């Protein structure tokens, strides 16, 4: 099996990054995988020390097939850093596994991602695979598809990322004029369309809402495991965006999740479960707080 490079995006959170790396090193295939880290530059001169401290740690990482640290000279911000880095790596390798510095993975995360990338490489109905699963009340299939893309521990191919639409106005116009807003908003249960409007108005800067909208308008599917192989550890006030809430917390699944033979179509069970999750939790703080950490909510 051809293993995809792991690409990690960091800024200045040393403790989080150490936890992310420690978990990755416990993964099946870690020692056979290339790790590429994009370290964003400091926003202000007074923040340079924390960035330098993190980079010192990054330079010490061992245990992967290779480690490459790309040190940004300036602060690009999360969205630009990710869009640029993903484009560079996927253009070179053809496939990619993407993480951020506040994600803790199951030992079987890389296994699931690589098996998914291998199985669906030439199936253009599938745009990506994701490791995080919302903590829904319903029991989900071992593998399932949703008509979207996602951003908490994900993987794609060059053919998928080549579809990425940077033009927010184009995405929003297509969804609204095609009368797809309600579906895009999971039955009207979460205002993703409004996120696109806020992106267009310059109120937010999110690559992830555009990635989701891109997959949606192209009618693409994303593969998920039935249990979450990713835990988001960033809800602790340390990030630029945070929630300080536990609604999205999951129990990390510590067993293998095989990529099984299933119909390449959206799971009605999963679609209904996620829609109900949004409906149940939308009025709680996590979904009302000015789209805080919105890249993690879909």
Image: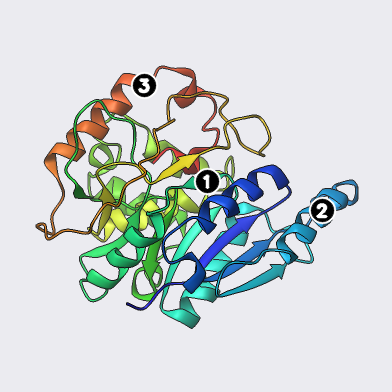
Q: Residue at x 57, y 60 (%)?
A: 8
Q: Residues within 10 Å of mark 2 (few under 14, many from 20)?
A: few
- Residue where numbered disc 2 is placed: 53
- Residue where numbered disc 3 is placed: 281
Using the image, tell me which numbered label, if any, was put on residue 103: 1
Callout 1: helix, strand or loop? strand
Mark 2 to mark 3: distance in Å?
Answer: 38 Å
1 and 3 marks in contact (CB < 8 Å): no
1 and 2 marks in contact (CB < 8 Å): no
Report whether residue 120 is seen: no
In-image side of 231 versus 58 (left or right): left
Compare marks 2 and 3 and give the one earlier in the sequence: 2
Callout 2: helix, strand or loop? helix
Which residue is at the front of the view, 138 or 73? 138
Which residue is at the front of the view, 83 or 28? 28
Q: Position of residue 246 (x, y in %)?
A: 48, 24
2 and 3 marks in contact (CB < 8 Å): no
Q: Position of residue 208 (x, y in %)?
A: 46, 51
């Amino acid at each position: 099996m051809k293993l995809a490079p792991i690409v990690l995006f960091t800024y200045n959170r040393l403790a989080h990054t150490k936890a992310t790396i420690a978990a990755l090193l416990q993964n099946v295939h870690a020692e056979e995988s290339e790790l590429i880290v994009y370290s964003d530059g400091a926003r202000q001169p007074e923040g340079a020390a924390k960035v330098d401290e993190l980079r010192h740690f990054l330079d010490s990482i061992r245990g992967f097939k290779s480690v490459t640290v790309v040190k940004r000279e300036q602060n690009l911000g999360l969205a630009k850093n990710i869009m640029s880095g993903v484009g560079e790596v996927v253009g070179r390798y053809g496939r990619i596994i993407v993480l951020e510095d506040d994600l803790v993975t199951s030992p079987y995360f890389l296994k699931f991602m690589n098996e998914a990338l291998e199985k669906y490489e030439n199936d253009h109905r599938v745009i990506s695979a994701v490791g995080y699963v919302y903590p829904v009340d319903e029991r989900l299939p071992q593998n399932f598809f949703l008509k979207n893309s996602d951003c908490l521990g994900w993987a794609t191919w060059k053919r998928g990322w080549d579809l990425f639409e940077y033009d927010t106005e184009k995405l929003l116009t297509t969804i609204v004029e095609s009368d797809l807003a309600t579906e895009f908003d999971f039955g009207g249960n979460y205002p993703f369309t409004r996120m696109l409007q806020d992106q267009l108005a310059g109120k937010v800067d999110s690559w992830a809402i555009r990635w989701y909208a891109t997959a949606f308008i192209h009618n693409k599917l994303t593969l998920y495991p039935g249990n979450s192989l990713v835990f988001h550890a960033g809800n602790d006030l340390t990030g630029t965006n945070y929630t300080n809430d536990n609604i999205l917390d999951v129990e990390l699944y510590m067993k293998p999740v095989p990529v099984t033979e299933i119909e390449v179509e959206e799971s009605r069970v999963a679609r209904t479960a996620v829609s109900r999750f949004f409906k149940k939790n939308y009025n709680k703080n996590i979904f009302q707080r000015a789209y805080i950490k919105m890249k993690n909510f879909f």
